Image (cartoon, grey):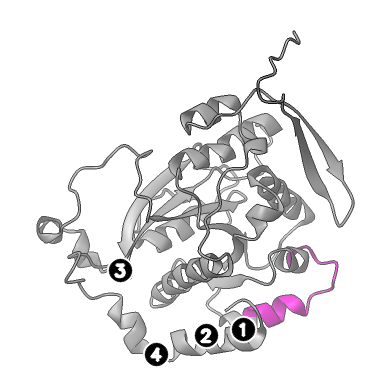
Amino acid sequence: MFRARTLLGVAACHVFQSPKLVKAEFRVDETTGESSTAESKNATAAAYSKTKLFRRDPFTVERSRKVCVLIGMTGVGKSATANTLCGAKRAFETSSSVVSVTSAVRVRDYSFAGSRWRVIDTPGLGDTNKSYEETKSELLDAFRYAPYGISSFIVVVPKGRFTSEMEQRVREALDIFGGQDAIRHSMIAVTRTADAPEKLLDDIMRLPQDHTLRRLCELVDHRVLPIENVKEPSIAVSRLLLHRGIDEILELNNDEKFFAPKSTLSVGLAKSLQLDLPQARCSTKWSTENGPRLVITCDFPSPGVKDTAS
């Protein structure tokens, strides 16, 4: 889907010209007893489903469950995209204001297309009332809910105006998560559009080379999808596109999930993930090489060497 525009065209053809494929997602799965329709939310469906009735510890997750993390500025449709992913209307609170309604990492588990999924919604970027360290801590908290790795990072951006500040915040967030390694597991979801993937990519690549959205698109190797979170049947199509995109990112990475780099973890978080991480001294600085980037450098003591510094 992402390697070339011709492939995007084929993918769009399969999704948009095969109504049976989309319709099939609304049928009850004979194995799990689950459905993505509104009827599956009532008590009867819950009674006959084989899934657990009671919610578990959110830090407990099956190894096979696919986990995606949503990143984006406040008010771009990040939480609405999380609702589209899990097939619910109000699983995540949404808002179009400049004040983020997501003040902490939120998680939702669900089943779709024969697989088990977990979507993690992170607080909106760009809150001027938060320091860099607070933002970093909130973002890295997502790893606590993905002990067996993250399948994909979904960068949510709005159709239309995408400023240099937005680009800087998104790049900063990706650097916090792991830089180039995280980018290889990332894609862009452009909200408020029902265009075919090929048309959306063509429109972006027609922008000037120094345009912020085009630069971000090239950063993730043109892995871009159109997402509509308001109108049906576009919501159902967007849901299918998102899950197919996550599966393709896993395929591109040889089915290997992304794990928290030790250099980005705090000691407290490392302990919660049961990682053996020594105390590190970290520093940050901006680099202009190959575009603006936030460089995080951490020095770790050698194994068996006690840190005597005060």
> How crowded is the residue under tag 1: few (<14 C-alpha within 10 Å), some, or many (20+)?
many
Does 161 lie within the magenta span? no
Viewer-nearest residue: 74 or 121? 121
Q: Nearer the viewer, mark 4 or mark 3?
A: 3
Q: Circles 4 and 1: CB distance less than 8 Å?
A: no
Q: Pointer 4: what residue?
A: 18
Can residue 228 be seen here? The reply is no
Nearest the camera: 33 or 236? 33
Among the 4 quarters of the image, the one containing residue 59: top left
Residue 5 visible (yes or no): yes
Identify the mark nearer the N-term, 1 or 3: 3
Q: Which contiguous range is marked in magenta?
A: 200-213
Alpha carbon distance from label 2 to label 1: 7 Å
Q: Earlier in the sequence, mark 3 or mark 2?
A: 2
Left or right relative to 12: residue 215 = right
Of labels 4 and 2, earlier in sequence is: 2
Residue identifier under label 3: 114
Q: Which amino acid does the dot numbered 3 rest on?
A: Gly
Q: Residue at x 23, y 76 (%)?
A: 27
The single residue placed furthest to the front in the displayed view is: 304
Estimate the spatial distance between the alpha carbons at disc 3 and disc 2, rounded to whole Å: 22 Å
